Image (cartoon, rainbow, N blue to C red):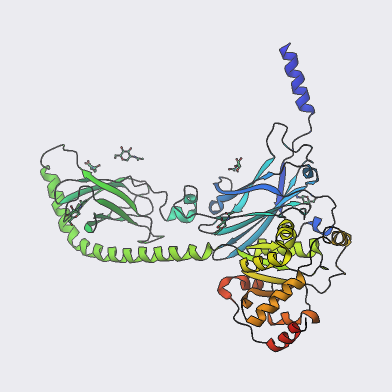
């Protein structure tokens, strides 16, 4: 009986439609869906996460990849969901940008998985570099629903350095000795000597042991015959003060990083009391070791100084580098004339800002509720204050490029929302009169266009043409490159403002 039930159950399960999985491929350009209008679109993602993972399949130095996982919102719009597009831009020495598109193999029949729980997927790709800031943006296809609060979800992710448990497998880190476990043991043999034992690394054969409690109380270098297999090495260090409880630091010299490689630490403990006095041959070898060590000690002192300098410099570089890369995203308020196509032009542009220029975009369309609560002037003033940049987004071919979708959105949801462009322009004019916050303003044209007469005052602002100078435009948003007080065309502008 139970067998029959079981096989029935198996049949039923077999009859269920297959669960959607993902098929991902690179898609760096715009998705074909951008070109077509969709009356019904899926909502945005519920959650987006990134973590580095070590993979065995990829080539040696691409062995650390991002595991990007996302959760879909459990609402009815899920049945329009065809794909999710993920774009990653990285910022370290070089700027990188690439996108993948993950198609769902089946249409979603249910808002949650048949087994319960929300739909969740993950994609492993995009190589992770050390100490790099990444911006990961994801949006659903067809284009996100514009009545949602945010059309795409983004997270930032700063990859850790070699000390991380995953990143230490990067080739660079391995070569710097990050996988080296010297398993240091150090013990105080008597008032004057400390014995340090450690496992050597195949990466190098020169080591320096430093004993310090607050100041350096002894150093010793060891040059072991080069061995490809790790072996235990032993070095005796002469100390000038109480060594019990002091710290022993082992500084290796590897050809990839010189004296600037990873350093390992241990603690000096009392040696187990095996024999009361040292065996004769051992003490002799220790003595000859000292004699040999004297010239080495001089070198070591120099090397130590150099090492400390290098370390100090390294720390300084390390300290100053993340500070510049871990800046918060630039807050950008975008204002655009009402006749502009929202979905095809404004959305595209904000997507560009978010994905390429690591900006957080403030857009009236996404904050309709807030605008209704605060009133448009109050909202605009607050946002202008909060924003790092205010962009007047203009386009010459406003009406021609609009298709049915845009026309519709212009008729219905836009009618009830205020047109903020003239208000923003008035705010700009009063800033221009008082010469405040002017560095915040930028004009961006989607195509090569002249600023229309009625807004000619804007011509004092830095102007960028998206098609021609996208990269330069992104850099111009960075706070380091603030645009100084504007001078040119000031008078013309005054007159055109006051005529409003
Ligand atoms: C995903 O679907 C789009 C449109 O149907 C197609 O152009 C693309 O090649 C597909 N990508 C993959 C990886 O299957
Ligand atoms: C990626 O993350 C997801 C969600 O945390 C997990 O289920 C999946 O196993 C991870 N993939 C890899 C390759 O680690
Ligand atoms: C470290 O060294 C001690 C003593 O030599 C040994 O007992 C221990 O197993 C070693 N640990 C590792 C991880 O090699
Ligand atoms: C260090 O190694 C030597 C042999 O090389 C051994 O006699 C001694 O006990 C070791 N000391 C420690 C603290 O492990
Ligand atoms: C550190 O060294 C000083 C002498 O330089 C000594 O007086 C002190 O006891 C030592 N501290 C420890 C914790 O061993
Ligand atoms: C992005 O980075 C900024 C600062 O670098 C931080 O304040 C913010 O919490 C980060 N956002 C996410 C989603 O991690």
Which residue is drawn at the image coordinates 31% and 66% (left, top)? 306
Most extreme residue toward the bottom is: 491
Is 140 above or below relative to 435? Answer: above
In the image, is 49 to the left or to the right of 456? Answer: left
* Residue 442 x/y as whole percent: 68, 75
Name the residue located 32 percent from the left edge and 63 percent from the top edge.
308
Q: Name the residue furthest right.
A: 404
Task: Tell me if I can see residue 451 in this picture.
Answer: no
Tell which residue pokes out farthest to the top in this image: 1
Of residue 433 and residue 293, the one placed in the foreground of this image is: 433
The answer to whether residue 322 is seen in the rendering is yes
What residue is rendered at 24% in x and 54% in y? 211
Q: How many marks?
A: 0
162 and 149: which one is in front? 149
Q: Classify 13 as above or below 171.
A: above
Residue at 85% over, 52% down: 39
Q: Quadrant of the C terminus?
A: bottom right
- 219 to the left or right of 387: left
414 horizontally vs 251: left or right: right
Which quarter shows the N terminus? top right
Q: Nearer the viewer, residue 174 or 281?
A: 174
Q: Quadrant of residue 91?
A: bottom right
Expressed as whole percent of the image width and height from the top left, the position of residue 21 reads: 72, 40
Q: Please tell me in which quadrant of the rendered image residue 488 appears.
A: bottom right
Please tell me in which quarter of the rendered image ligand 3 is found: top left
Residue 74: give x, y in percent of width and height.
73, 41
x, y (%) of residue 365?
A: 75, 60
């Amino acid at each position: 009986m139970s067998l029959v039930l079981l096989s029935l159950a198996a049949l039923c399960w077999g009859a269920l439609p297959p669960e959607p999985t993902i098929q991902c491929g690179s898609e760096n350009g715009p998705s074909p869906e951008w070109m077509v209008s969709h009356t019904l679109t899926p909502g945005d993602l519920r959650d987006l996460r990134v973590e580095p993972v070590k993979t065995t399949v990829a080539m040696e130095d691409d062995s650390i990849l991002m595991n990007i996982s996302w959760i879909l919102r459990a609402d009815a719009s899920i049945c329009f969901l065809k794909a999710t597009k993920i774009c990653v831009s990285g910022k370290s020495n070089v700027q990188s940008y690439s996108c993948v598109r993950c198609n769902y193999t089946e249409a979603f029949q249910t808002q949650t998985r048949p087994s319960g729980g929300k739909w969740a997927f993950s994609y492993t790709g995009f190589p992770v570099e050390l100490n790099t800031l990444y911006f990961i943006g994801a949006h659903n296809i067809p284009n996100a629903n514009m009545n949602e609060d945010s059309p795409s979800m983004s997270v930032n992710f700063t990859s850790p350095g070699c000390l991380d448990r995953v990143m230490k497998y990067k080739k660079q880190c391995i070569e710097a000795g990050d996988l080296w476990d010297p398993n240091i043991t150090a013990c105080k043999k008597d008032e004057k000597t400390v014995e340090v034992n450690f496992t050597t690394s195949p990466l190098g054969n020169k080591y320096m042991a430093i004993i310090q409690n607050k100041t350096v109380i002894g150093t010793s270098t060891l040059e072991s015959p080069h061995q490809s297999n790790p072996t235990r090495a032993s070095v005796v260090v002469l100390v000038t003060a109480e060594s019990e409880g002091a710290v022993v630091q082992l500084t290796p010299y590897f050809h990839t990083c010189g004296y600037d490689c990873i350093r390992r630490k241990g603690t000096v403990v009392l040696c187990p009391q095996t024999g009361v006095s040292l065996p004769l041959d051992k003490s002799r070898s220790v003595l000859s070791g000292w004699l040999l060590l004297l010239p080495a000690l001089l070198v070591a002192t120099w090397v130590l100084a150099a090492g400390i300098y290098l370390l100090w410099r390294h720390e300084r570089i390390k300290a100053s580098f993340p500070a510049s890369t871990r800046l918060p995203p630039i807050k950008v308020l975008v204002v655009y004339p009402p006749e502009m196509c929202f979905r095809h032009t404004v959305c595209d542009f904000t997507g560009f800002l978010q994905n390429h220029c690591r900006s957080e975009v403030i857009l009236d369309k996404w904050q309709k509720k807030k605008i209704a609560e605060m009133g448009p002037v109050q909202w605009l003033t607050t946002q202008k204050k909060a924003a790092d940049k205010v962009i007047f987004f203009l386009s010459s071919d406003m009406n021609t490029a609009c298709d049915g979708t845009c026309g519709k959105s212009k008729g219905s949801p836009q009618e009830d929302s205020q047109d903020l462009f003239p208000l923003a322009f008035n705010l700009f004019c009063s800033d221009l009169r008082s010469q405040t916050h002017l560095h915040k303003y930028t004009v961006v044209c989607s195509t090569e266009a002249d600023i229309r007469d009625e807004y000619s005052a804007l011509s004092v602002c830095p102007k960028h043409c998206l098609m021609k100078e996208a990269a330069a435009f992104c850099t111009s948003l960075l706070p380091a490159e603030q645009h100084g007080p504007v001078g040119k065309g000031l008078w013309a502008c005054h007159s055109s403002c006051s005529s409003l």
